[in-house]
Image (tube, grey):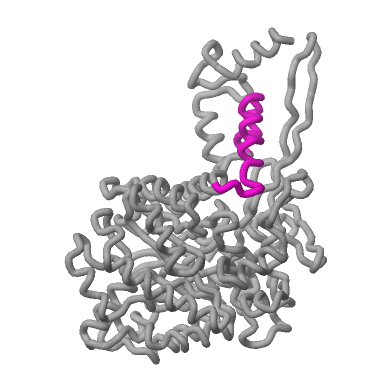
Amino acid sequence: MKTEFKFSYPSSEKVYLSGRLYPEIKVGMRKVHLTPTVTIKKGERCEENNAPVYIYDTSGAYSDPNIDINLECGLPKLRQSWVIKRKERQTQMYFAKQGIITEEMEYVAIRENMNCEELGISTRITPAFVCKEIAEGRAVIPANKKHPESEPMIIGTNFLVKINANIGNSSTSSGIEQEIEKAVWSCKWGCDTLMDLSTGKDIHETREQILRNCPVPVGTVPMYQAFEKVNGKIDALNWEIFRDTLIEQCEQGVDYFTIHCGIRLKNIHLADNRLTGIVSRGGSIISKWCKEHQRENFLYEHFDDICDICARYDVAISLGDGLRPGCTHDANDVAQFAELDTMGELVERAWAKNVQVFIEGPGHVPMHKIKENMERQINKCHGAPFYTLGPLVTDIAPAYDHITSAIGASLIGWYGTAMLCYVTPKEHLALPEKEDVRIGVITYKIAAHAADLAKGHPSASIRDNALSKARYDFRWKDQFNLALDPERALEYYKASNSIDANYCTMCGPHFCAARISHSLKNCEE
């Protein structure tokens, strides 16, 4: 297995901002250095310096030239000294309810703001604000005490919209090395959390390697491993097998679990008349178990036990939407919303045990039905963060579902969804490979950032304005370096342009509006 992974970004420097409450905190960011703006005034060349731009960085130690990384040893344990002094059941929500600001809370406040203070931009996102949002359940910091390698991040409506990348093997494709490479690759391009959805062999070993080498929170669906333990025999599943799997994954360091506790025996029949039935893997497994045994969902029955286990490790729960719609025809139906009602009940039970919780949402929803999803979730689930897969706004574009879903993701992010689960071009078709992961992450960074701009996040427009100015100034290098995918932007440009020309082949030298605009300014002067 390849043991060394390092990467860099063009004209960028890895910098660290320190905490005030906890001076030992060092929050990593990417500082992009810009070239000066060059103008000719009265025949003389003039240069105007452009301030560097700070960018939210999910690459962890992989982009720090001063840290040596070996995948066999794992990443530095950033949070080890913070968590070692905490007692069992002292979760982020436990501290927040007492008004205690943890290291993680200050860390995410600094991370969200980047260098807003230095730029004179006012921001409401202080450590105290973070603490209040967590105490009231509107935000989540997924940070298992057993995953000290992760860099704290926050999921909540009042913060930057986050994106999750799914990786994981299947019984027919991929292995440990490929999945680790995809995990690190996802972090390079900007994923905020990572879900290991492995269903093939070596599930435990794959997850262990990912956790030890992942700088972002890692989530799983424990039912997948529990199902493998009984060799895919649904009737052999039981609470004890699931419980042991849950504890096993907590001990490894999983930061959040997707658990389909909201499916009730009495509601499963509501999906009978759907066009596409039940499309969630975990949802279909637990629904069949309930039907075969004619018993209530054991995940629902043991929800308090699940919360007790998660509280010991400070693992967050993502309430899985097992009855989510699998096509636009089935969106917002009675089955979907019956499960959402149950989730609202479970949210309050989790909060009572100081367990952080967020809600998974659809799925496939046409544009005119998206807002109803957000409004109903806020109302029924008491403001707990919403986490959606897209949603896809049409079903006619296999191979382009990263686009159909990004349209819905932008809208629902604007309406208040806190985290978006990426979709790759391989959705519904095949297991995504490295390049598919890259496309999925970048596509969803666009959707999330578009939502941040619409919501007016304090730091959202800084990068847009810097890139727009670089474009107007014909500072090509800065345009590439500020882009979400600098390598692809440069590749496309170099294919048909000469570097540093004050036009591109789209317009040519005579039809370039920016050149004409510059000449207008010169006329006025």
- Which is nearer the eye, 506 or 466? 466
Q: Is residue 427 left or right of residue 459?
A: left
Residue 218 percent coordinates (x, y) = 53, 69
Q: The C terminus is located in which quarter?
A: top right
Assess whether residue 108 is covered by the magenta stretch: no
Q: Residue at x 81, y 63 (%)?
A: 20
Examine the rendering and report whether any part of residue 196 can be seen: no
Q: Residue 519: which quarter of the image? A: top right
Farthest residue, direction left: 273
User: How many marks are shown on the rendered structure?
Assistant: 0
Question: Image check: 272 left or right of 58?
Answer: left
Q: Magenta part mainly helix, strand or loop?
A: helix
Closer-to-camera residue (302/25):
302
Residues shaded magenta: 455-481
Of residues 405 and 214, the one nearer the viewer is 405
Q: Is residue 173 above or below residue 328?
A: below
Location of residue 348 with respect to 488 vertically, above or below: below
Up-down relation of residue 35 to residue 369 (above or below): above
Tell me the quarter of the picture where residue 524 sits.
Answer: top right
Residue ID at (21%, 85%): 292
Q: Is residue 421 left or right of residue 270?
A: right
Residue 480 lies in magenta, yes or no?
A: yes
- The image quadrant of residue 354 is bottom right
Pinpoint residue 506: horizontal percent, then vertical percent. Answer: 48, 21
Q: Please say whether residue 259 is visible from this viewpoint.
A: yes
Q: Position of residue 473 (x, y in %)?
A: 66, 24
Residue at the limit of the structure toward the bottom, as seen here: 240
